[in-house]
Amino acid sequence: MPRLIAASLLLIVTSTTLAMGQATNGSRAQISQVEMEWRQATCRASENWLRRACQEVLGTFDVIQPAQAEPETVAPVDRPEVDELHLVGIYEPRTVRQTGQPVRQGSVVVEVDRPGQDVALVLTSHEPVQWDIVASPDTRIARVILSGDGVVRSPAQVNSSPVEVERTTLPLAYEIRGNRFQPFHEAAFTFVGVDRADSFHGAYTAPPGGFLITRAPGLATQAEIEEALLERAVDRADLNASFRSVLSGDGSPAGAKWRFDGEGFIGRDDAGTALRYAAPLILPDISWPMGAAHDPDGGLLWGITLGGEGYLYRFDVASDEWTAWSMENHDAGGLIFDREGGMLIATPGPRRRSAFLVMDQRGQVLRRVGIPLEDFPGLLDTFDPGNGPSPRFTPLAVMGTEILVSAGLGMGGSRASARSPIYLVDLADRSVRLVK
């Protein structure tokens, strides 16, 4: 059973059990915002027959709003000016285990060595945590802001002495990459009243030694990141005519007239007549179809799937013949036919081990082109790398060694959304450019 199916079934069972338990008490089940986001991501990544049931179960939940809880400490009325803002984010404190001793949750040490500076600290965690702040001589801790689902139960101290803290609700982030960080960053520096944070330290589980703050390099804002990306991006006007036509809407992406679904191919001929080519039962079941490719000259259709080991299906219109080949566990995000080269190109799917595959018309891999997601400008900021699937790449057009792709989080269908970033990939030198 594919891992996403198993995860979705487990999510439905556990969610239903939790919801029924709450219902017996006459109330709706409640989960945190982080937990709800994880469950929703799992639902979206499921097959169609599971997705609806999964979403219906999640509809019975209420999201806990930490801001509604009565805080232990009221935020100070007068907020002092600060020279620097430093952010620390974790999901959970470490668990301390010693032979023969009870298991306990460890405190999180935050050492701050910024002599001569009035420092504001924003400390956030999904789980309750004891924050132990250690300030070096002449480092002044002007403000301590706590956030997270367990904020009410999270005390803090500076140099072993209790400290007045402010408690608020900010987005949670424990790593600087991914789509969670900038919303957290912006909310934090806005709350403190500065134009950016000076540093960030984070981890899913707090490290044994805690965190050490000695520098203030300054963090880029979302606007600055986007501006830098656009400066390095290639303008659409500089692309070849074929690529420009597809992006402008004057031309259609390759294979756009055909769709590959759970039953086979559906599309229209040149006269506009609707056609359906159903796959015979002798072929492997079509599970998670990820795209179709079309050779109008040879009268051939191909479809590719993600489910199980994955399969490449081919239908010869003239001979009415179906064939299928194993993708040998390659996770494809889409498929396109290169009319000039007479080859198929499978684009990377929503899992990190996938790559661009150049194949012959029978699915024999001629070349594998692996390109790290980090090489796609700005891509890591569009999803949560630590949770859920990575983006799939949908092919739009190909010419020579260059392929135009869109990157999105959708698992089904054949086209990404209008907000999906567009990349120009050269399969010869493995270069990647963002298209603006």
Image (cartoon, grey):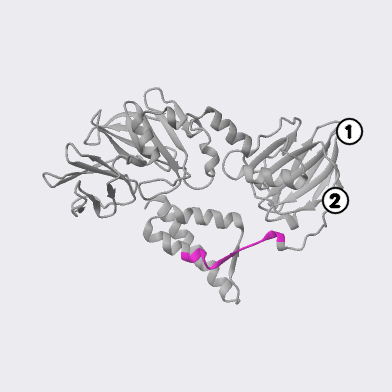
Q: Where is residue 201 in the image (x, y as percent from the top left)?
A: 68, 38
Taking 119 as reference, is 383 left or right? left
Taking 278 as reference, is 96 left or right? right
- Write the start and end of the magenta stretch as one range: 56-67
Element at label 2: loop
Give residue 44's quadrant in the image. bottom left
Precedes in sequence: disc 1 or disc 2:
1
Specify few, some or many for label 1: CA neighbours under 10 Å numbering under 14, 14-19, or 20 or more: few
Specify few, some or many for label 2: CA neighbours under 10 Å numbering under 14, 14-19, or 20 or more: some
Q: Position of residue 272 (x, y in %)?
A: 22, 51
Q: Which mark is residue 164?
A: 2
Front residue of 205/276: it is: 276
> Residue at point 37% right, 23% down?
428
Taking 301 as reference, is 188 left or right? right
> Residue at point 33% right, 39% down?
251
Q: Position of residue 425 (x, y in %)?
A: 41, 30
